[in-house]
Amino acid sequence: MKNKENLFNLRKKINKINTSIIKLLYKRELISKKIINEKININYPIKDSIRENKIFKEIIKKGKKYNLKKKYLIKIFKEIITNSIKIQKKIYKKKKS
């Protein structure tokens, strides 16, 4: 019975972490929406490969501290960045039409 209780408690911790991740992704999206407005104001391109490369270098560096695999981090952050670009393109189209 004790093992099931341990499993339940560990799963509760995972659930809390999942909620935190969701909240952080939401906050990131809000900032991404503000960023596109600034990009529009200064006529800056939506996609910035130099910035993306810096992000990937930074997350890989930080991931090493926690023994996280490079491939894993790149896969996750590619998806996050792709989502931000989609959001920004949608806002850009609305503002420019």
Image (cartoon, helix red, strand yellow):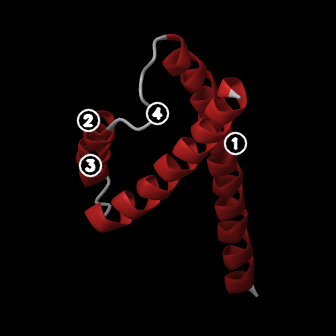
Give above or below for 69 relative to 83. Answer: below
* Residue 46, label in figure: 4
Quarter residue 35 falls in = top right
Q: Identify residue for label 3.
A: 65
Q: CA distance from mark 4 to mark 2?
A: 12 Å
Q: Residue drawn 69% across and 70% down?
A: 11
Secondary structure at numbered mark 2 = helix
> Looking at the image, is mark 2 or mark 1 earlier in the sequence?
1
Q: Residue at x 62, y 49 (%)?
A: 21
Disc 4 packing (10 Å; few <14; some 14–19; many ≥20) = some
- Tell me which amino acid carries mark 3: Lys
What is the distance, in whole Å, between disc 4 and disc 3 at their CAs?
Answer: 31 Å
Front disc: 2 or 3: 2
Q: Are the residues tagged 2 and 3 within 8 Å (C-beta)?
A: no
The residue tagged 1 is 23
Q: Amino acid at mark 2?
A: Ile
Mark 4 or 2: in front is 4
Q: Residue 19 placed where, x, y %?
A: 71, 52
Between discs 4 and 3, the one toward the N terminus: 4
Q: From the image, which quarter does the N terminus lie in? A: bottom right
The image's mark for residue 57 is none
CB atoms of marks 1 and 4 within 8 Å = no
Question: Mark 2 sits on what residue?
Answer: 50
